[in-house]
Image: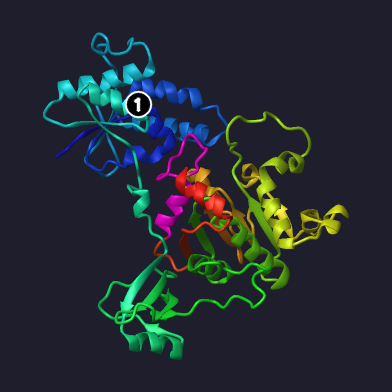
Amino acid sequence: MKKNFVLDTNVLLHDPRSIFGFGDNDVVIPIYVIEEVDNFKRDLSTLGRNARQVSRSLDEFRSRGKLREGVPIGDAHGHLRVLVAEHKLPHGVGNGHTIDDQILAVALELAQRDQATPTVFVTKDTNLRIRADALGLHAEDYDVEGVVLDELWSGSSELEVSPEDVNAFYAGGALPAAEGRDAPPPNAFVVLRDRTNPQHSAVGKYSAAKQAYVPLIKTPKEGVWGIRPRNKEQSFALDLLLNDEVRLVTIVGKAGTGKTLLAIAAGLQKTMEDGVYQKMLVSRPIFPLGRDLGYLPGSVEEKLNPWMQPIFDNVEYLMNLSRSEKKAGRGYHELLDLGILEIEPLTYIRGRSIPNQFIIVDEAQNLTPHEVKTIITRVGDGTKIVLTGDPYQIDNPYVDQTNNGLIHVVNRFMHERLAGHITLEKGERSPLAELAANLL
């Protein structure tokens, strides 16, 4: 059945292409939404860019017909309309003067006037959805991915096989995937478990090129810059990080699971020891936890120091410096001076082309899908990019657990041979950190 979808401002600012995402249904934009969009158009942020794109799209629709009467949306049978509220909300519901009240009034009038066509109010504002529901409107969140975080692909699975299959895997170094069974995504990890004896098992990954399960990359005896995996998920993560054929790696995990440490250790190994990449470039979004400190003095490097300190802590931990070496001034500065390590604010990444580098984007859950697209499209020849983050710790007010850039990439690249993903479950920072992550 055809429906009327009334869009709130935050939907358009979150996804400027949302107008085209409702198929053959009608899309209605209250005129007050355009007023709010206008307030953002001069911003130099992502919101400003999205606001300008929305304005251009609406102006293009206007050139094709009258927006009040309805203009066809692309090749679909749906129409776009811009409407004004003729009446205020019922007495006692808001003061009728706020933008939210006027947007709700448009949706309510449309629902009452066109009762033959269901009206759906779409907003990312939780409180506005509650208010709409109280007025008898059907309200929904706007979620392009439509994924529940608990159902996010973990990157690994278990597969029951015969005892002979487990033995064949160890003996031949590969096990052909069973025909007729749905093939797992490329670079998916698997625990091959003997159905007659669960203790008899093997770990491997699916190779789409060979259409078989193959062993993991062997970690060097001395570890990766002294780091050895403490659980099977960390072994899976190191396999992805050390595999030069996998150019995009996403690592999701709660605090203390080792996401950043493993990524930096692999980056230093590939850059300094193996010489596969010219340098390691590390970046993270600038979002404070709690109150911001305000503007910071100094050069770009000096401004970034407080934000990048978690990266420097990990690098110094990997360098395993003695107290006397630290007193002598040794540390991550040496890597910066040698040009092996580079710290880059994401603010200046647009327009760059970055070849032959190992890029780590930490705290990627604070990025929007568009920002992640901007970053990944900077990748040049011979570059590998690693996105790490915890979708349960989001500081960006404009994204949530399911529509942030990190989860967006996991879903979109799930079936690509150049990409790999793993979710780290077990905290390894300390017993106290693991307990806090679970209890608090």
How many numbered callouts? 1
User: Would you say residue 166 sits in the magenta stretch?
Assistant: no
Q: Quadrant of residue 415?
A: bottom left
Tell me what residue is drawn at x 65 percent, y 63 percent.
Answer: 265
Q: Which residues are magenta?
A: 393-413
- Quadrant for the N terminus in the image: top left
Residue 110 visible = yes
User: Would you say residue 395 sits in the magenta stretch?
Assistant: yes
Whether residue 176 is situated above or below residue 42 in the rendered picture: below
Whether residue 216 is situated above or below residue 234 in the rendered picture: below
Query: Does residue 349 appear left or right of residue 240 in this picture?
Result: right
Query: Does residue 273 appear left or right of residue 249 in this picture?
Result: right
Q: Quadrant of residue 272?
A: bottom right
From the image, give the main secondary structure of the stretch colored magenta. Answer: loop
Tell me what residue is drawn at x 60 percent, y 65 percent.
Answer: 381
Tell me what residue is drawn at x 78 percent, y 39 percent.
Answer: 299
Whether residue 211 is situated above or below residue 269 in the rendered picture: below
**Residue 138: x and y, percent?**
22, 30
Query: Does residue 245 appear left or right of residue 305 in this picture?
Result: left
Whether residue 274 is situated above or below residue 89 in the rendered picture: below
Q: Quadrant of residue 229?
A: bottom right
Question: Which residue is labeled 1 in the image?
Answer: 127
Amino acid type of the residue tagged 1 in the rendering: Asn
Q: Residue furthest left?
A: 116
Residue 67 visible = no
**Residue 193: x and y, percent?**
36, 77
